[in-house]
Image (cartoon, coloured by chain):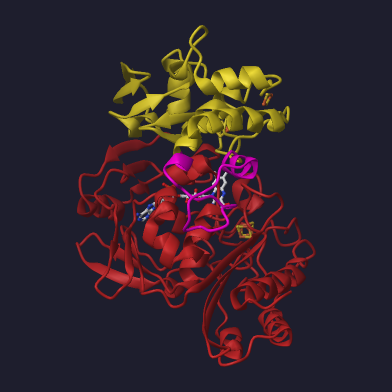
Amino acid sequence: MTPFHFSRAASPGEAARLGRDGATYIAGGTNLLDLMKLEVMTPDRLVDISRLDLGGIEATRKGGLRIGAMVCNSDLAADRTVREDYPVLARALLAGASGQLRNKATTGGNLLQRTRCYYFYDTAMPCNKREPGSGCGAIGGVTRLHAIFGTSPHCIATHPSDMAVALRALDAEVEVENADGKTRTVPLGDFYRLPGDTPHIETTLERGDLITAVILPASAGALQAYRKVRDRASYAFALVSVAGVMRIGKGRIEATSLAFGGVAPHPWRDASVEQMLKGQEPSHELFAKAADALVANAVTHDGNAFKVPLLKRTLTAVLAELTGAKQ
Amino acid sequence: MQTQLQINGRGYALNADPRTTLLDALRNHLGLAGSKKGCDHGQCGACTVLVNGRRINACLTLACMHDGDEIVTIEGLGEPGRLSPLQQAFVNHDGFQCGYCTPGQICSATAMLAEIEAGWPSNVTQDVAGAPELTPEEVSERMSGNLCRCSAYPNIVDAIMDVAKGKRT
Ligand SMILES: Cc1cc2nc3c(=O)[nH]c(=O)nc-3n(C[C@H](O)[C@H](O)[C@H](O)COP(=O)(O)OP(=O)(O)OC[C@H]3O[C@@H](n4cnc5c(N)ncnc54)[C@H](O)[C@@H]3O)c2cc1C
Ligand code: SF4
Ligand code: FES
Ligand code: FES
C-alpha cells in the first residue's frame, strides 16, 4: 500500500470539501483497501466517512424508502420493510459477498465498487480503466467474467454489484451532496456511464460528490425475484443475475421491470423486453420470445459466449417464478 | 497515528502507520496472533473478529478506523480450561485438521448464531420475510465466508449445529 494521509470527516459538508480537493472517501473499506493493497488504487489522502450521520432506513412521504448511504448491507437485508416490500433487494444483498463483508459494506460503497476484471486487478497487465490509454488486457484474453452488452473496443468489464441490479429493477435514485452543500438526486439509470473511450470514468458523479442516500419509490409490484448464477453456490460474484419486479392483473402482466447483472458495465435494463411482456398472458412462448429479444444485440468473446444461453435461461426461470408458470 | 482499542475487555493504545489493518495491528503490534491471515483480501475469513458484536474481516479494515471500538478475538472467547461452547464443540466434533481457519470459523460462528437469533434471513431462507430456520443448509450458507482448505466442513457444521440446538432448547 502506498502511504496516505488519514482524517475523519465531522460532517458530510466537510467530507465533500475534502473530496473536491482530491481526497478519497473510505466507508466500509472492503473494496478500496483490497485495491489499495494491490496498488490498483493509490489515493494519497483518505477521508473516513464511516462515522457520518448517514445511517437509517426511513419511509418517504411518497410511500417509498430512504436508505442512508452508511447503512450496511446486512442491516439493509434484515430490515423489516425491505424484506416485506422490496424482497428483491433483500435477496440480492444476501446473494452477495459473505456475512462478514456485508457487515462492513455500505450502500454507497456497494454502488461504487469497481469491476472484478482480472486485468484491472493485475498491475502488470494493460488496462484502460486502471491506466487510461494502456490497452485492454481482457479483449483477446480471459473473458469469463466479462460483459456482453454496453461494451466498447476499450473496455468490456462488468459492474459486479448484486445490490445495484435489484435497485435498478426498483427504479432507485441516488441522493448526492456536493462541496457547495447542494443536494440532488440521480436516477440509477443515469448514474453509471458506459465505457466508450473513457472506461476510467464510471459514473456521472463529479469530484467531491458524496452519496448521502438511496431512495426507493413505492414498491411497483408484489411479485419480486432475484436469481444469481455463479461458479460456486455461495460467496462468488455473478456470472449472470436477473432481478425482476412484476404486477399481474386478470391473468395478464400489467407491468414488469427487469434488470440484469454480470452482463454489462452497469445493471442492464432493456425497455423493449419489458414492453414486449406488458399486457400479455404469461406463457413459455412469450418468455422465450423475450429472452431472444434480450440477447439479440449481445456481443460476445470466446470466454463469455456461454452467458447468452445462460442469461436466456435465467430470465425464463425468473419470469416463470414471477408468474407462477410451471417450467 | 494514535488509536484506542478495547480488545477482549482490555484497553490498548496503538501507535501505528495509518496503513495498518486491524489484522496486522492485532498480530504484529498487540501480540494477539490468534486471528490468522489467509488471503489478506476478504476472501477466506481466517481473520474474522467481532467488532461491537459483529463479525468482520480484520484484514479489510484499517485499525485507525476503529478508535473506541470493542473488539473480541478468539483469545477473548475462551482459553484452555474455560472454552466457549463453540470452541468445545469444535474439539468434540473434530471441526478442524490443520486448525488454521479455526479461530476465524469460531469467531464467525459465534456472531452467526446471534444473527439467526436476531432473525436475519440468508440467501437460502425460503421466505425472506419470515423467521429463519436452523438447518445445516442455513449454517453452511451463513458460514460461506469462512473457507477451510482441509475441508473440515461437515464437522464444522455438526459442531455449530450442536451448539445452536442447545441454545434453542
Ligand atoms: C471476497 C469478496 C467477495 C465479494 N462478493 C460480492 C458479491 O458477490 N456481490 C457483490 O455485490 N459484492 C461483492 N463484494 C463487494 C462488496 O459488496 C463491496 O466491496 C462493498 O459493497 C463496498 O462497500 P464499502 O462500503 O466497503 O466501500 P469502500 O471500499 O469503502 O468504497 C468503495 C468506493 O466507493 C467510494 N465511496 C464509498 N462510500 C461513498 C459515498 N457515500 N459517497 C461517495 N463515494 C463513496 C469510495 O471512495 C471507494 O472508491 C465482494 C467483496 C469481496 C472482498
Ligand atoms: S475489460 Fe476494462 S477493466 Fe478489464 S482490462 Fe479491459 S479495460 Fe481494463
Ligand atoms: S485474511 Fe482476511 S479474509 Fe482472508
Ligand atoms: S482446518 Fe485446515 S484450513 Fe480449516
Say which quarter of the image contains residue A137: bottom right
Q: Residue at x 68, y 50 (%)?
A: A233
In screen coordinates, is A77 left or right of A212? right
Name the quadrant containing residue A20: bottom left
Label tally: 0
Q: Quadrant of the C terminus of chain A?
A: bottom right
Which residue is located at x 48 percent, y 70 percent? A168
Identify the residue at the far right of this view.
A302
- Chain represented in red: A
Q: Give how far across and how far down residue A61 sits, in percent.
A: 24, 73
Please tell me whether the stretch drawn in magenta is mainly helix, strand or loop. loop
Residue at 70% across, 49% down? A232
Q: Is residue A271 left or right of residue A321?
A: left
- Find out whether residue B82 is within the magenta segment: no
Q: Name the residue at the bottom extreme.
A: A279
> Would residue A201 be visible to someone looking at this image?
no
Q: Can the viewer see residue A89?
A: yes
x, y percent for residue A144: 73, 58
Residue bounds of the magenta highlight: B115-143
Ligand 3 is found in the corner quadrant, namely: top right
Q: Is residue B120 magenta?
A: yes
Q: Colour of chain B?
A: yellow
In the rendered image, the vertical position of residue A109 relative to residue A6, given as above or below: below
Give x and y (percent) for residue A103.
44, 43
Instruction: Determine which quarter of the picture holds residue B29.
Output: top left
Residue A104 percent location from the top left of the image: 43, 43
* Residue lying at 38% horizontally and 36% vertically, measured from the top left: A4
Q: Nearer the viewer, residue B63 or A128?
A: B63
